[in-house]
Amino acid sequence: MAVTLPLAALAPLAPSIRSSYREAFTNGQVWLDRCGISETPLRLAHFLAQIMHESGGLTGQFESLNYSAARLPIVWPKRFKPTGPLDPAAYAHNEQKLANEVYGGRMGNTGTNDGFTYRGRGIIQLTGKDGYRNVTQLLRKHDPAAPDLVAKPDEVISAQWSLAVATLIWQSKGCNEKADEDNIIKVTIAINGGKVGLADRTEWLARTKAVFKI
């Protein structure tokens, strides 16, 4: 029997939830069910922990690339001086220029502005043109009328599609099975590609487990 996720359960976790995300969860149980996330409280706890980290407590829509010159060499040491070739001052606090530099030419980004256009978005930060294309295909298996996320990337943050996108990404990366192991490291690597933010994700997991009394 599927575990229902009422909005009341989100209130203590995300008191400043965006209105579009609130609407998404109001109508989103079907996606939690379709993608197997609602099969157990443990899966829901892990899913919520990851999305709370990724979206800043369901407040963020876009990946923030507003870095200072001092921070850039720490985040991308191979790209920015002193160990990389680029002058961090030329990219500091310029999100569009930075996105096109660090994301351009990979993840399916081929156009001059693709890095910025397909920067991280949504409840689980979908990044890269290939990612937007792949999730479009996943959506259309369930709903042939789903939007082309490559053509309309902001649908990723919409009330209608944001939770659907997040749940399909979760399922496609095998996160249900990793959550069944209660292995936050495996789940984090699947979602993030590494262990960025692991401490924060772990704190979120403790909070989401408390909601489901795990």
Image (tube, rainbow, N blue to C red):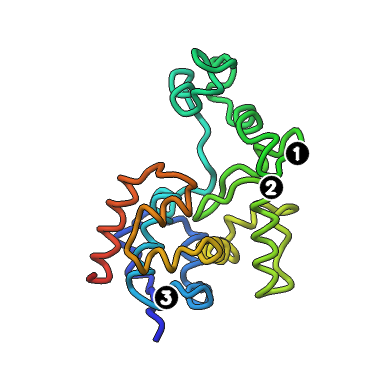
Q: Is residue 67 left or right of residue 134?
A: left
Q: Is residue 142 left or right of residue 177?
A: right
Q: Position of residue 74 (x, y in %)?
A: 43, 24
Circle 1 residues within 10 Å: few <14, some 14–19, many ≥20: some
Q: Tell me residue 173's x, y (percent).
A: 52, 60
Q: Amino acid at mark 1?
A: Thr
Vertically, is 15 above or below 194?
below
Residue at 44% x, 72% y is 37
Q: Earlier in the sequence, mark 3 or mark 2?
A: 3
In the rendered image, residue 8, in percent from the top left (x then y), is placed at 33, 70
Circle 1/circle 3 CB separation < 8 Å: no
**Tag 2, which secondary structure?**
helix
Comparing 169 with 118, the one in front is 169
Query: In what quadrant of the picture does the N terminus appear?
Result: bottom left
Taking 194 as reference, is 126 left or right?
A: right
Q: Secondary structure at mark 1?
A: loop
Label 1 vs 3, first from the N-terminus: 3
- Residue at position x 52%, y 64% in the image: 163
Mark 1 to mark 3 CA distance (whole Å)? 37 Å
Tag 3, which secondary structure?
helix
Query: What is the spatial separation of the Cα atoms under label 3 and label 2, in whole angstroms?
Result: 29 Å
Which residue, given by chain and number where applicable, does mark 2 sit on? 129
Which of the two residues, 69 or 12, is positioned nearer the viewer here? 69
Quarter holding the C terminus is bottom left
Which disc number belongs to residue 182?
A: none
Name the residue carrying label 1: 110
Evaluate if marks 1 and 2 touch, with contact meaning CB atoms under 8 Å apart: yes
Which kind of residue does numbered mark 2 sit on? Lys
Q: Residue 213 location in percent, x, y? A: 22, 71
**Dot 3 surroundings within 10 Å: few (below 14), some, or many (20 or more)?**
many
Instruction: Read off the residue under disc 3.
Output: 38
- The residue drawn where x is 33% and y is 70% is 42
